[in-house]
Amino acid sequence: MELETVLEHTSDAITALDKEWNYTCVNHSAELLLRHKRVELLGRSIWEIFPELLNTPAESQLRQAASGRVSVKFELFLPKLYAWHEVRAVPTENGLILFSRDIFDRVRALRDEAVRAEIRNILKHAPVAISIMRGQEHRIEIHNVMFQQLVGGRSLEGLTVRNAFRELEGQGFFELLDQVYTTGVTYEGKEILAHYDRDGTGEMYEGYFNIIYQPLFNISGQVDRILSLNIEVTQEVRARQRIAQFAAERDAILQQLLEGVIVTDVEGRITLVNDAASRLHGVTKLDVLPESYSEAYNLYTEDGHLYHPADLPLSRAALKDEIVTEARWRIRRPDGAEVLVEGNARPVYDEQGRKIAAVLTMRELEV
């Protein structure tokens, strides 16, 4: 009687099987674990209750314990219960006693760790800086090699973003992460400027980044992590800034010249007309292609015929790579005045010898 009381109240799930594999004993913990009432199990075969065990390693282990009269210990997954059990089968004179317990949490933890290891392996050498931040405090759980290169090779795993990058306070990044975590809406930013201690030396670095903050949801549909993708575009932004500065300086210089100047891109599309050229033509029209030069700017030959677009000095320089000198043509301005001009045109090449533009200079001739 005392033994039955102990069996009934122990936390281990204990069942007994006779030599025909029928349940002969089921304690209360076993009812909970197997999700069957005692009356549903007693007198019935384990293979009838759990047919999914047939032809599995679990069946082999149980039959080995029964036939070889040796204790065995194994783990099994019951799809019908969606549960992992650890089972110890001990042979007796009448059959087997099974000591079982739920190990779902342990298996899940092991699998989660395996998944994290696999994710880390996949992300490790991805050609973009990646980190995964967990929880409302955005604790850095995983980051890859490219991410470490952005922070001087340091490992920041285990730190919250606010502790790892205190210098980002006030630059809007923490607020963006909070927003993504709260709303579950992805954030994408282009060429975002960040001032941060790149190498951990206290010296501030200025860089531009394309950023994606992607929320990750748990099985309850709640955000519990954020995936961060970071691509540094500092060199590209700096190069474009230098080009823009150069273009601004060039335009300022060209606007001061007494000669008229028209510049095109590599396709011959007009990109700049300086003040002197505008005064000569009486109009300023940009984005004009070579086939429309004559019509857009009212260009005529010296003897008064509409200039064929392909024969214009700027067209020849832009489309045929010709250098044209001392060419003459007439301009009929919108006010009716006609101007005779002389000009030179030539293609423009970069340091690698690639054509990048064409330029026309002109001056008014005294008639």
Image: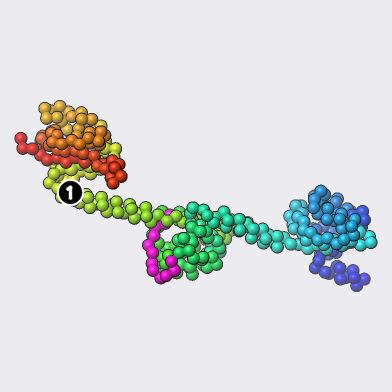
Instruction: From this view, report whether residue 293 is shown above or below residue 151.
Output: above
Where's the N terminus, which quadrant?
bottom right
In the displayed structure image, the side of residue 20 where residue 315 appears, left or right: left
Residue, far left? 367
Q: Residue at x 86, y 55 (%)?
A: 64
Q: Nearer the viewer, residue 13 or 151?
A: 151
Residue, far front? 352
Q: How many marks?
A: 1
Q: Position of residue 41 (x, y in %)?
A: 87, 56
- Badge 1: few (under 14), some or many (20 or more) residues near its Cα, within 10 Å? some
Q: Residue at x 83, y 53 (%)?
A: 60
Residue, far bottom? 2
Instruction: From this view, report whether residue 65 is shown above or below residue 365.
Output: below
Residue tagged 1: 255
Residue 200 is covered by the magenta coloring: yes
Residue, far right? 93
Q: Position of residue 324 (x, y in %)?
A: 18, 35
Where's the C terminus, which quadrant?
top left
Q: Residue at x 67, y 62 (%)?
A: 109
Q: Position of residue 362 (x, y in %)?
A: 14, 40
Q: Secondary structure at mark 1?
A: helix
Q: Position of residue 194 (x, y in %)?
A: 40, 62
Instruction: From this view, report whether residue 206 is shown above or below residue 356.
Output: below
Please state the extent of the stretch shown in magenta in the rendering.
199-210
Three-letter residue code for mark 1: Gln
Q: Quadrant of residue 204?
A: bottom left
Residue 231 is covered by the magenta coloring: no
Q: Nearer the viewer, residue 288 or 41?
A: 288
Using the rendered image of the protein, determine whether residue 137 is visible from the camera's viewpoint. no
Using the rendered image of the protein, determine whether residue 153 is visible from the camera's viewpoint. yes
Q: Residue at x 10, y 39 (%)?
A: 364
